[in-house]
Image (cartoon, helix red, strand yellow):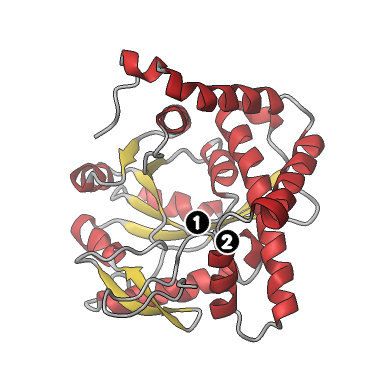
Amino acid sequence: MSRDYSAPSFRHLRHWPALFGVGIFKLLTRLPWPVQTALGRSMGWLFFHVVRIRRHVVATNLRLAFPGKTPREQHALAAAHYQSLGLGLFETCLAWWAPMHRLPPHEIVGREHLEAAQARGRGVLLLTAHFTTLEICARMLAGILPFGCLYREANNAVIAKQMRLAREARTLIAVPMDDLRGLLRALKQGHTIWYAPDQGKRTKLSAMLPFFGVPAMTNTATSRLAEMTGASVVPYFGLRRPDGSYLLTILPALDNFPTADAEADSLRINRLFEEHISKAPEQYFWVHRRFKLSRREPSVYTR
């Protein structure tokens, strides 16, 4: 259930640091974009070398996903990932608070695939994964091809409010992550819903499946959602280019999907994610503990 942001407790002293931070970043979005990118990369450098938040998680993920890379190459990739995280923070602020004309240059390839799926009138799951470019690329796409989204509220009430306001302002419909009935209803009504099932949790709709060749707890709900609603599943990926522009790629709807084998369908999705993550691996969200195992096995993240 969504929080009541109008409640007096929201103005409690404990929220002031977050409110101050939001105010600072709103001001920073007024700076020229090259200045913001420089600040983002510098922040990423600081968090990698000094603060070191979740650095062990990132190093473990990269070691498991890219065993063919040398330790030095994995270290360099981890450093690049933190710079991508820093950029992602400023991209998020730009996506939430800046007008469309101030967004960086971007190109959308394959929009005809989404338009064809939408023309069926049976709903679309806009299938993607958690990249650091998630927010800004979604904003760019929504400015041309409006869609709805799923969202999970942040733990911090101030950030959760800003996130929800941005979702509701920039998308046609915003459905809480835990509102399955709301998601099914939106798809049956013909909505296009942004959907990223790559952060698996242990649920009835999960299975241990390879991700970059390593067993990982994987969400298998995509097949079920498509089966229950008749929605098309259209893959979409947004990447940051070396020149600072962005490429948004929309692929044709998955054919022969869903099948009777939800695990095979989910493995197919994992391989699709692997293909596009490998194009810019530093931009994937490696700070997440992706390689969760069963409860009977020791965590790969144990030091």
Q: Which of the pair 27/255 is nearer the observer?
A: 27
Q: Secondary structure at mark 1?
A: loop
Numbered circle sitting on residue 171: none
- Quarter holding the N terminus? top left
Q: Amino acid at mark 2?
A: Tyr
Numbered circle sitting on residue 130: 1
User: From what the image shows, is residue 42 above or below residue 242?
Assistant: above
**Residue 75, image x, y percentages:** 70, 71
Q: Amino acid at mark 1?
A: His
User: From what the image shows, is residue 24 above or below residue 141?
Assistant: above
Residue projecting furthest to the bottom:
68
Q: Secondary structure at mark 2?
A: loop
Instruction: Give the crowd class for mark 2: few <14, some 14-19, many >=20 residues within 10 Å.
Output: many
Numbered circle sitting on residue 284: 2
Q: Which of the pair 22/204 is nearer the observer?
A: 22
Callouts 2 and 1 close, C-beta under 8 Å = yes
Residue at the image position 45 percent from the left and 82 percent from the top: 214
Q: Which of the pair 202/72 is nearer the observer?
A: 72
Q: Earlier in the sequence, mark 2 or mark 1?
A: 1
The quarter holding residue 20 reads top right
Q: Which of the pair 72/170 is nearer the observer?
A: 72
